[in-house]
Amino acid sequence: MAIFARSFALAALLLTLVPALFAVDSTPLLSNFQDPVDLEALPDGSVLVAQRGGLIMRVYPEEDRPTAQVWADLSSSTLTGPEIGLLGIAADRDFGATGYVYALQSFSSGSEVTLRIVRLRDSATGALLNRVIAENLPSGTEHPGGVLAIGPDGKLYAGVGDGGMEASQVTPSNLRAVLLRYNVDGSIPDDNPDPKSPVWAWGLRDLRGLAWQPSTNRLYALDRGPTIPKGTMDELDLIEKGKNYGWPKYVARDVATGITKPVIYCSSGHSWVPGGALFVNNGDWTGSLLFPGAGEGVLYHLTLDSRTPTKITFYEELIGGALGALIDVAESPEGNLYLLSRSTLYRLTQD
């Protein structure tokens, strides 16, 4: 099905951009996923689909008839709710040799809702729990964050939201509204802002997407902001070591000393509700950033200047709501692009 892009001026930040009109084909591969939250491509061309209830499905999308099987079942240890559950997964950079996949899940610690990161290991019969990497991370039933990724530096990054807590409790020292950075064994890297703390950056309300620009290794993040009249204050941030991004005292449109402004943010009349994020490594979109939105069912496509990291040189909106809420996007080593909706996995090709 060919779906055409639509464009709009996103506040004053995008008024100078004139998006071109493209079409993208979306081919449905498999359906009936149950509240999927994350999509991860593996070296053999298969993809993992994590579902909030705790199941991780392994899909072989390039078969004549794509199939899916349960790869891991974390349902017995995952605390679920409208916003909590199994939240994110990340494959080891050397998955072919180690078979490791990391998972971030909501977990019950007594009467408290917490987060923990576990490492799974691939086997002939599916995944086995290998070890707990981090546990007792503070959370709540709202705004849990949940994004998990391994950076080009080989470190493990995890987004922990504010948990829906009062502003006085949302501080870096309380590990709320933060981006955490670990060694893959769960220890704290010596070059973190505080070598005794996993906090890498803070003031991030509900992180949902992380992606590194291939040409520069700069880290960009999608943060879900608060609801405003007729929209949300979601933002795209350039993440830098030890920086404060404002939450809970400031939102995306605010300017204050010591607060890092977003690259771009969603404004009144629009609602991204972003999921994952991806810098494309192959094909015509090489170097472009893609991120899906559940709010309006849009796949956002933009490019960022490699010399001026906060400068957007191209912007367009694809899909336009035709597939419903969009959750995540991934690219296989062969350059195949996949898009995940609330229930269906699609293959994307540009016309």
Image (cartoon, rainbow, N blue to C red):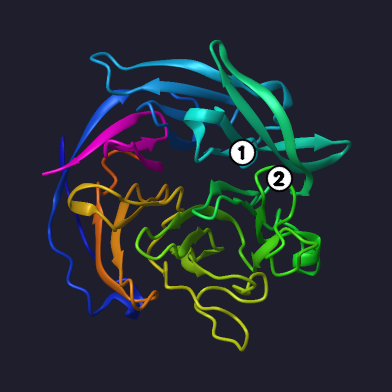
Q: Is there any visible trace of residue 326 in the rendered image?
A: no
Three-letter residue code for mark 2: Thr
State the residue at coordinates (72%, 58%): 198
- Helix, strand or loop for the magenta stretch, by majority: strand
Instruction: Quickly name the residue at label 1.
Output: 82
Q: Is residue 121 above or below residue 306?
A: above
- Asked if residue 330 is among those painted magenta in the image, a careful observer would answer yes
Residue 158 % position (x, y): 62, 51
- Tell which circle, 1 or 2, labels the residue nearer the N-terminal end: 1
The location of residue 125, given as percent across then percent down, is: 56, 10
Residue of label 2 = 141
Q: Label 2: how many residues lie within 10 Å, few (<14), some (14-19) or many (20+)?
A: some
Can the viewer see residue 270?
yes
User: What's the magenta region?
Assistant: 326-351
Q: Judge by depth and name the residue closer to the eye, 64 or 236.
A: 64
Quarter holding the N terminus?
A: top left
